[in-house]
Image (cartoon, rainbow, N blue to C red):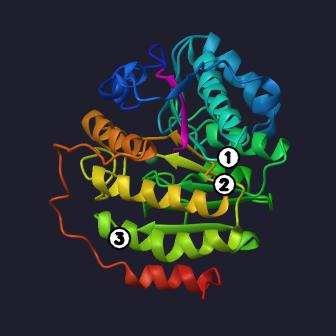
Amino acid sequence: MAEVFATWAPAPEHRYPGHPEGPQRLQGLADLPQTADGTVWLEPSPAPVEALARAHDPRHIAYLEAVSKQGPAVIDYAPTYVTPSSFDDARRAAGGTLAVLDAVLAGPDRRGFAWVRPPGHHATRTQAMGFCLFNNVAVAAHQALALGHGPVLIVDFDAHHGNGTQDIFRHEPQVAYFSTHQEDIYPGTGAFEDEPQARGRIVNVPLPALTGDDGYRRVFEEVLWPWALRLRPALVLVSAGFDAHWRDPLTRLGLSALGFAHLARLLLALAAETAAGRIVFVLEGGYDPQAVAESGRAVWAVLHGHEPPPAALGPSPYPEPDIAERVHYARRLHGLP
Ligand SMILES: [Zn+2]
């Protein structure tokens, strides 16, 4: 049985009145670290500045430290906020992710989940954006490369496009990026044709509203799977946002907890096929606390080799659009047979 490593960094002081990205998101999962399920829990120590600086401009790191110290403030239009604890919280989110990464890289058949806040995938090399301060997954991918583990595949199933991750790796041949996201919402990037210089390495599949369990299954099986087998990554990182759940208040996609579990199963199989099982899930968005709890537990169960527990919210009540043409287009664009 694979070993499971995890970290828990809920950042209780990083919060802003009325803001959806707050510690309440993780409340329904707070018992996970106390559950006797064999997980090895690792301390989320602050990431060293040198590790952050592989993904971020040193001026961005210095800016976040300075602006956090000044007290609560909104620093971009998303709105992204900081509090006096935010610099340390963001360093712990990245550092916890690195702790899980290091453990997973230390041997075969290891997997992990970094339950961290604030999220990361909108943060670019130079800017905090979209509730994200440091790009946790990008910091981890750079660390893996520095340790000689490449190529790295990043799969991002958050409902929003990970513009920051795409930005950081747009010229890095050793990192491949795959994103499914709702089209025409924040941050506006993530078209099929983005980053033509990285065709076949950066793959975006924008999806219409209400795309749910069936549509996601098709995209993962018919685009991600054959493409990733061609890449042969040495490590899989997952930007695991649960805001593609049908009940999320910020988006209009249609995944259910069982749909997320199915994606997780497929990702584990992919990691087993290409990367000696090495895979790390990193929490991104998800703004309905019950949907986050049910989806998170479903993925967590799959990580431990169990069936997902019953989910009270059930499947999406809305009919799904047909996404067959998008699947064909993505396959053609990226040269899949
Ligand atoms: Zn999101």
At label 2, the amino acid type is Ala
Question: What residue is rendered at 69% in x and 53% in y?
Answer: 167
- Say whether residue 4 is magenta: yes
Q: Which residue is mark 1?
A: 108
Residue 138 visible somewhere in the drawing:
yes
Give yes or no for contact between labels 3 and 2 (Cβ–Cβ under 8 Å).
no
Q: In this picture, is 236 found above or below 7?
A: below
Nearest the eye: 161 or 230: 230
Q: In this picture, is 77 found above or below 277?
A: above
Give yes or no for contact between labels 1 and 2 (Cβ–Cβ under 8 Å).
yes
> Sequence order check: which comes first, mark 3 or mark 2?
3
Q: Position of residue 107 (x, y in %)?
A: 70, 41
Q: CA distance from mark 3 to mark 2?
A: 28 Å
Single out the residue that lies furthest toward the front: 1
Nearest the eye: 165 or 38: 38
Q: Which residue is mark 3?
A: 215
Q: Residues within 10 Å of mark 3 (few under 14, many from 20)?
A: many
Q: Which residue is mark 2?
A: 276
Q: Could you say which quadrant of the image residue 30 lies in?
A: top left
Q: Position of residue 28 (x, y in %)?
A: 30, 27
Q: Position of residue 334 (x, y in %)?
A: 63, 79
